[in-house]
Each structure stands twice: as structure tokens, then as C-alpha cells.
Amino acid sequence: MAYSEKVMDHFANPRNVGEIENADGVGEVGNSKCGDIMKMYIKVDNDIITDVKFKTFGCGAAIATSSMATELIKGKSINDALKLTNKAVMEALDGLPPVKVHCSVLAEQAIKAAVSDYYKRRGVDPEPIVGNVPECDSCGCGG
């Protein structure tokens, strides 16, 4: 299984690792069957994601996709962050092996879960904005 240089770089030197104290939104998604669990924290100011951090338990591809996803949404509006697709994350990493595509899906879902939590904390129903966010253990990768 060959990984791109970008995947290896984000695995070896992940960006935005950690937690944000008093985060405005926290999302956790994963699948215990395949062992990948992602937790994403966002700080929002005037509808802009000013800071984002993650903690991922999983393979190198899961860590790399989490790292890249945080880089792609930092400084962006919530709307733009919600438009980020797993395909865009994979393209930014110069591709992933087919058996690791589910990792990029988890990264997309973690962002949506964090934004969903952000809206819930503000008393706003997130479903019309974010859609239905899968709970942890439902990424469907089949592990």
C-alpha cells in the first residue's frame, strides 16, 4: 500500500493536534470495528473557525486526513467548512489507497459533528444546516 508524500508528512508531522479548552463545538465520530476514532474541536468567532484541533486514535491515514482536514477549514467560515468533502481531503493529500478512503469520510463527518455541536450549544437545531450527523461507530467502513 503506497502513501503519497503528503500523507506521510501529515502522519509524521500532524498539524493542529490536541484539544481546545472551552471549545465552541466538539465532534466525535468513529468506528470501533476498524479502530479509527476522531475527535475534532472548533473555536468560532463571527462565524469563522479561528482554531481547530483534533485527537485521532487510528491508523496513519486517519491521522493524516484529520490533520489535513483541520488545515483546510482553519480560518474558513462555518459554511465553507461544511462544504469540505472527503474527496477534497483526499485530493489535498494526493490520494489515499482505496481501503483507506473511509478515513477521509471520518474527517468530513468529524467536522460536521463539531459544527452540529456548535449549533446545539447555541440553542439552534443543527439538522437543517448540517444534516443528519452519524453517531460514533456508524461510518460504515465495515472495519
Image (cartoon, helix red, strand yellow):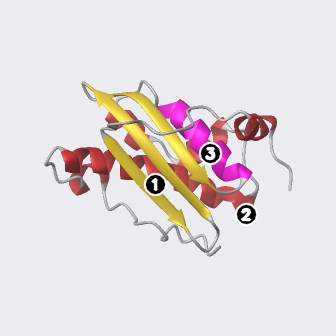
Mark pair 1, 3: CA separation:
12 Å
- Where is residue 108 shown, x and y percent of the image? 49, 50
The type of residue carrying mark 3 is Thr
Q: Secondary structure at mark 2?
A: helix
Placement of the C terminus among the 4 image quadrants: bottom right
Q: Residue at point 47% right, 59% down?
A: 29
- Where is residue 12 shown, x and y percent of the image? 76, 37
| Number of on-image labels | 3
- The span picked out in magenta is 60-73
Q: Secondary structure at mark 3?
A: helix
Mark pair 2, 3: CA separation:
14 Å
The type of residue carrying mark 1 is Gln
Mark pair 1, 2: CA separation:
18 Å
Q: Residue at point 46% right, 45% down?
A: 40
The type of residue carrying mark 2 is Val
Q: Which residue is mark 1?
A: 109
Query: Residue most toward the front?
Result: 21
Task: Characterize the local packing of mark 1: few (<14), some (14-19) or many (20 or more) Cα atoms within 10 angstroms.
Answer: many
Query: Residue most toward the left?
Result: 123
Q: Nearer the viewer, residue 12 or 127?
A: 12
Sequence order check: which comes first, mark 2 or mark 3? 3
Task: Characterize the local packing of mark 3: few (<14), some (14-19) or many (20 or more) Cα atoms within 10 angstroms.
Answer: many
Q: Which residue is mark 2?
A: 99
Sequence order check: which comes first, mark 1 or mark 3? 3
Sequence order check: which comes first, mark 1 or mark 2? 2
In this picture, residue 64 sits left or right of residue 39: right
- Where is residue 36 shown, x and y percent of the image? 61, 61
Query: Residue most toward the right?
Result: 2
Q: Which residue is mark 3?
A: 65
